[in-house]
Image: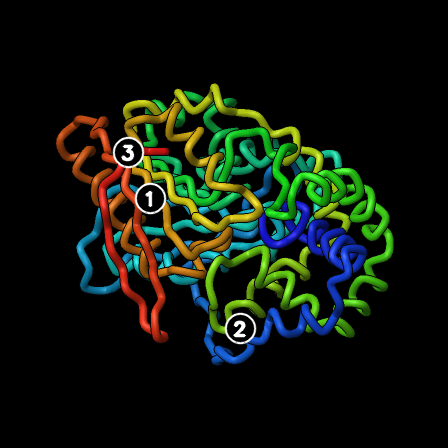
């Protein structure tokens, strides 16, 4: 999920709610000025070593494969990265390079209706189907050998759905699992940092608003071109918890708003109905990482706390001054932790022992005078 009712819808409805509360356009522009001032150019183009189309339920899914970087040690597990709602594989721009350089083969894929994957039947836009799609990607691209599965937001839910429907894949092949800014359920109670009243209005109005807009894609495209200032403000507010370069805001906004409204609308009910907390037991005994942004408005930190309560063996990282788009907002922290997860998983493969109980931690990112100051402390999960 990214900056909306679980993507775009919250931005549309929150803008209306803000206007009703007397928040003028000039305030929106002032609020996004910091991100604009930080504006820098960045190159988010990645060239994979291999590309493939995996057919799942008659839908071609776009897959990219990166080989380990030349000169790096070759590690046995393959890392499969799954992105979130209204995003595509590009959300892993920084992590794919870090994993390649650490010697891992990396597989990335676009969910149906997202990125370069094809559109499917609207009835197929469910978390259950994403679990089956992930199973097809694994079966066709990585048919043998140990796996490390890492998912951001809806990508983490797809991993849970895989475990629910294909438990033998997790028990026999998965040696590491990473869940970043995701949830195992109860998303229908989230107020998106708007308070109970406006949060309830978003839930009540958002799905219907997005559903109506799904039939008027040209109107949406025209409105977005005319209202880039508001678009950037909403993405910055709901996707991030700190000041980030404008290039990152724009890259995130492009991912979100390039997703067809029909796809955004069709996926919304399955996200709100998602409930797989009991299924987290499937990851018991597997090297597991849970990461979350302290200021995540889309999926509040409590969702990560609840997941860790069911997976007490997890390494738990909470990043302060960070929102929902953690892989793009603080890539150096995420890079460090996903590579550490992959390396722990390698040691588990080599030793034949799958379990290693992680100690929950908070990783704090403090910004002062334009510089980053990072401290790490060990703490019990809240």
Distance of label 1 from label 3 (alpha carbons): 11 Å
* Image position of 189 with respect to 205: above or below: above
Q: Is residue 288 above or below residue 310?
A: below
Residue under numbered circle 2:
35
Q: Toward the viewer: 80 or 271?
A: 271
Q: Which comes sooner in the sequence, label 1 or label 3?
A: 1
- Which percent across, then down, holds residue 232? 63, 68
Q: Which residue is mark 3?
A: 380
Residue linked to disc 1: 317
Answer with left or right where residue 221 lies relative to residue 195. Answer: right
Q: Marks 1 and 2, Cα distance to the nearest angstrom?
A: 26 Å
Are the residues at dot 2 and dot 3 in contact (C-beta closer than 8 Å)?
Answer: no
Image coordinates of residue 148 in percent, x first then y, are: 34, 39
Category of crowding for the residue at label 2, using alpha-carbon neighbours closer than 10 angstroms: few (below 14), some (14–19), many (at least 20)? many
Residue 276: x, y in percent?
A: 52, 25
Real-space CA distance between mark 2 and mark 3, rounded to the nearest whole angstrom: 34 Å
Q: Nearer the viewer, mark 2 or mark 3?
A: 3
Q: In the rendered view, does 321 fall on the left or right side of 3?
A: left
Q: Residue at coordinates 59% horizontally, 42% vertically from top-left?
A: 55
* 224 in relation to 299, above or below: below
């Amino acid at each position: 999920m990214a900056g909306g009712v679980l993507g775009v819808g919250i931005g549309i409805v929150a803008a209306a709610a803000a206007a009703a509360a007397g928040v003028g356009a000039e305030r929106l522009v002032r609020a996004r000025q910091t991100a604009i001032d930080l504006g820098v150019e960045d190159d988010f183009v990645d060239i994979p070593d291999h590309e493939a189309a995996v057919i799942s339920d008659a839908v071609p899914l776009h897959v990219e494969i990166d080989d380990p970087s030349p000169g790096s040690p070759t590690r046995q597990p393959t890392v499969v990265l799954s992105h979130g709602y209204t995003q595509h594989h590009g959300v892993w721009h920084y992590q794919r390079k870090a994993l390649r350089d650490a010697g891992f083969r990396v597989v990335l894929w676009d969910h149906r209706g997202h990125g370069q994957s094809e559109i499917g039947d609207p009835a197929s836009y469910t978390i259950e189907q994403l679990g089956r799609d992930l199973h097809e990607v694994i079966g066709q691209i990585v048919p043998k050998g140990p796996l490390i599965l890492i998912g951001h937001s809806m990508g983490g839910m797809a991993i849970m759905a895989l475990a629910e429907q294909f438990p033998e894949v997790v028990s026999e092949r998965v040696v590491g699992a990473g869940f970043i800014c995701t949830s195992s359920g109860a998303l229908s109670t989230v107020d998106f940092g708007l308070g109970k009243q406006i949060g309830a209005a978003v839930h009540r109005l958002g799905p219907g608003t997005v559903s109506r807009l799904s039939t008027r894609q040209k109107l949406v495209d025209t409105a977005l071109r005319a209202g880039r200032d508001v678009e950037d403000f909403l993405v910055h507010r709901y996707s991030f918890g700190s000041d980030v370069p404008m290039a990152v805001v724009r890259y995130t906004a492009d991912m979100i708003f390039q997703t067809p409204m029909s796809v955004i609308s069709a996926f919304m009910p399955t996200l709100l109905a998602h409930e797989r907390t009991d299924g987290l037991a499937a990851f018991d005994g597997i090297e597991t990482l849970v990461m979350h942004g302290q200021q995540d408005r889309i999926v509040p930190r409590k969702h990560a706390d609840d997941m860790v309560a069911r997976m007490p063996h997890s390494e738990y990282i909470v990043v302060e001054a960070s929102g929902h788009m953690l892989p793009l907002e603080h890539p150096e922290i995420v890079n460090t932790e996903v590579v550490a997860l992959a390396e722990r998983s390698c040691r588990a493969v080599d030793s034949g022992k799958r379990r290693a109980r992680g100690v929950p931690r908070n990783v704090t990112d403090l910004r002062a005078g334009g510089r980053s100051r990072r401290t790490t402390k060990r703490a019990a999960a809240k």
